[in-house]
Image (cartoon, rainbow, N blue to C red):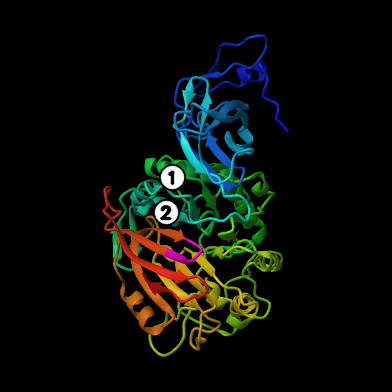
Amino acid sequence: MRLPVPSRRSLILALGGGVAASGLARGALADPVWAEYPFQLGIAAGDPTPDGFVIWTRLAPRPLEIGHGMPSAAVPVKWEVSADRGFGTIVRSGEAVARPELAHAVHVEVEGLQPGREYFYRFSSGRERTPYGRAVTAPAAGAAVARARFGVVGCQAYEQGFYTAHRKAAAENLDFIYCYGDYIYEGRGNRTYTGSGGTIENPRMHLGGEVYSLDDYRRRYAQYKLDPDLQSSHASTAWFCTWDDHEIDNNWVSALDQDGTDPAVFMLRQQAAMQAFYEHMPLRRSAFPRGSATQLYRRASWGGLMDLHLLDTRQHRTDQPCGDAWATTCAAVDASEAQVLGEAQEQWLYRGLDQSRARWNVLAQQIMMMDLDRKEGPDLGFNVDTWAGYRIPRNRLLKRIQDRRMKNVVVLTGDEHQNYAGELHLNGREPSAAPIASEFVTTSISSSGDGQDQRADGRRYLADNPFLKFNNAQRGYVVCDVTPEAWRTEFKVLDKVSEKGGTLSTRATMVVQSGDARVLPA
């Protein structure tokens, strides 16, 4: 259903910021005349299907101000999708409405396109127009696909480094990008960062204090999205977007935060954060927030090659055990009532895995599934904010994969600010003869600063956990190169993010052969 556009009178009465009306004819709403460029936050595409994808933009001539330089009125935005970069063959076009209730963001669900090919899109308002973006539609359902090449990104703390990795990823000509989360960070502006290497001076700073209100979150997203390297990454290909914790607050789960805030109060913060997340991501209407809840887990297919099960490991999870202490364990790790996905999402995942006929099944999620022993010495200690802190639901999922003899299950993870590759067993201390599945953990775009090839804890993890096959602590992203015969994961790393112009290299390439979950060097 096409939404009604605002009347001429309503726009004129509400004019403010950098927009004015002109050129009206026969009582229709004229295109705005912009005193300042309205598309400063860029464009994006997301959630590709065989016949289309979502395209996104947001009108914000003054993005860092409250009100973002816009009138308190809805404004029409034109859009076009072309079969070529020069826009000589327009295949779809239309007009959307940017509404003040959603910070003048626009989400267009484009349909009617051909499967398995690239398209180009752009927006315009008045005489202003965006650069073009590129997106690839998914292959037809069940179609034979010789190869897919996609990226994995996340953890992009603005303060702690530049987005060189996004600029490099934009040049990879990828079919799509999976963003596992931590798109923004919620903390106040800081001149320094304290990490494993001591106190580090941040190369840039967040504006303002910690974010709580809807205006706070909108401003934080705007600061991130003004980055030209991030804009280039979005424009290069469609993204599948999920979240982790920092889109709301560090280590939140369910209606609980790390500070012990009254859940009813914390849900107000969640509501603001979820609305801002939707406003700034290329998500479908199905993810539209409803109070302090949003539907983020979903499924996508890439022909007969891959089924992607995009998971939400925050919204439906029970509280972290052991007081969320680092490198520890306690009786609560074995709590029978513990949940990571929640019952509804878990059953949805099981149905999807059971029904899948794809060569590869991908669990695209946020927190490490390997039960990595992180404690120095003979005693066990886990990061209980990962699946290792939730032994019963972890084993329930892995046992189901094992019992149903599901081959070619690959888990994609983030959160750790390090690269990892390893194999999944019910108990990493007593590994079975053959691993159940494979896991690749992608490092951060910028979070934790420059990093290093390998930290002392990383060397210890490799020594203490034989199922772990690779570790690296630099910044960067991952490229997954998938064929019916093999899954190759390329770990792309930068020598620095504290300055612009970091040098990219492929630190390692790990491979999983079809039918064999072992992770091996290429």
Q: Residue at x 55, y 84 (%)?
A: 330
Compared across the picture, whether 21 is left or right of 37 comes to right
Q: Residue at x 51, y 63 (%)?
A: 484
Amino acid carrying label 1: it is Tyr
Return the x and y of residue 393 as percentages of the image width and height: 63, 76
Which SS class for mark 2? loop
Q: Which residue is mark 1?
A: 224
Q: Which residue is mark 2?
A: 156
Considering every residue shown, the one lying at the far top of the view is 26
The answer to whether one can see residue 314 in this image is: yes
Q: Which residues are magenta?
A: 483-488
Residue 135 or residue 215, whichever sits in front:
135
Tell whether position 486 is magenta. yes
The mark that comes first in sequence, 1 or 2, is 2
Q: Quadrant of residue 322?
A: bottom right
Return the x and y of residue 276 as percentages of the image width and height: 57, 45
Tell whether position 521 is magenta. no
Residue 312 or residue 250, whichever sits in front:
312
Please say if the residues under marks 1 and 2 sit with CB atoms less than 8 Å apart: yes
Which SS class for mark 1? helix
Q: Quadrant of the C terminus?
A: bottom left
Q: Residue at x 32, y 59 (%)?
A: 493
